Amino acid sequence: MVAAVTVPEVGTHRFAHVNAVRLHYVEAGDGPPVLLLHGFPEFWYSWRHQIPALAAAGFRAVAPDLRGYNQSDKPPGVESYRPELLVGDVVGLVEKFGSGPAVLVGHDWGGIIAWLVTMRRPDLVQKLVVLNAPHPATFATELRHARQFLRSWYTFFFQLPWFPEAALRFQNFGLVRHSLRRRTAHPGAFSPDDVRRYREALSRPGALSAAINYYRAALRYRRETARMYRPVRGPVLVIWGDRDPHLNPHVLDGLAAWAPESQVLRIPDASHWVQNDTPDAVNQAILSFLSGTWVAR
């Protein structure tokens, strides 16, 4: 069952200048900061169910549009989306809020960035929560197997110039609309109004190419990413929607070697869009983990 949330007034819209870009973000609540990092092809609105819950629990929920998305700056060129720069954006946001280490919560690409920030700057991360985002090292290992390589076909398709943009823009973002409405575990996880908002965000000048450039940069600068790999020494919660058509569960194999204190919550009736399919279960897990009352399952 998808919980109802009053939108769009889930928080205050602001801008921050960090790492030579202007990032838009939505925030609500007072207290320790929790940064919510969205994935592809989303924007801050991906966390519309989580922002009010975190604010009500005494946290400062901050959901940025990652660089290139929605109202944030969209620097041109693949090199503008190198892993080092994506990490630098989040580091800049954490340092801007200046109240000590923050909690990072990331889904999909936001989860990958959260992993990298935690490995690169563990002093800035109090706890880490990732949703359907494998550790980059375990994903690289699993990508050698056909069972994941075939699911990741779009990563290689996105390496082509201009054509991926044209394909996603075709029929008013038909592929995106199909993914949001038909590839979820629960009908209604994304309402028609939600889909309209996603389409509008991707329609902003430069946004679609910027989003695809994350994938282009991921392959071109993969050695840069690999240099950041190191074990995460701190509490990590992985929330995993089992009905993910893009990532098979084997991407979690070997996780304990990279995150010895990690725990995994698998949700059988959730898809890749886990925080939209089962927002109440995700909120409960995050809040329990942050309060220290989480019990491993």
Image (spheres, rainbow, N blue to C red):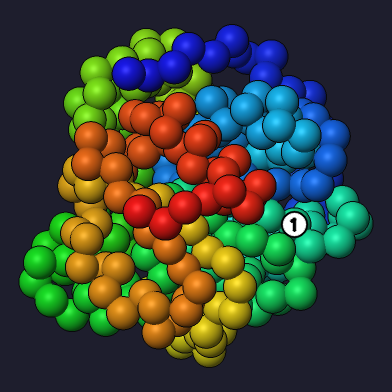
- Left or right: residue 242 compared with residue 198: left
Q: Where is residue 36 in the image (x, y as percent from the top left)?
A: 61, 45
- Left or right: residue 138 compared with residue 204: left
Image height of 128 relative to 202, above or below = below
Image height of 231 relative to 93, above or below = below
Image height of 270 relative to 231, above or below = above
Residue marked by disc 1: 102
At horizontal 70% and vertical 76% (from top left) the residue drawn is 121
Q: Position of residue 68 (x, y in %)?
A: 59, 47
Q: Residues within 10 Å of mark 1 (few under 14, many from 20)?
A: many
Q: Position of residue 83 (x, y in %)?
A: 56, 71
Image height of 126 relative to 122, above or below = above
Q: Where on the picture, by quarter, is residue 27? A: top right
Can the viewer see residue 294?
Answer: yes
Which amino acid does the dot numbered 1 rest on? Ala
At horizontal 19% and vertical 59% (from top left) the residue drawn is 248
Q: Position of residue 10 (x, y in %)?
A: 67, 19
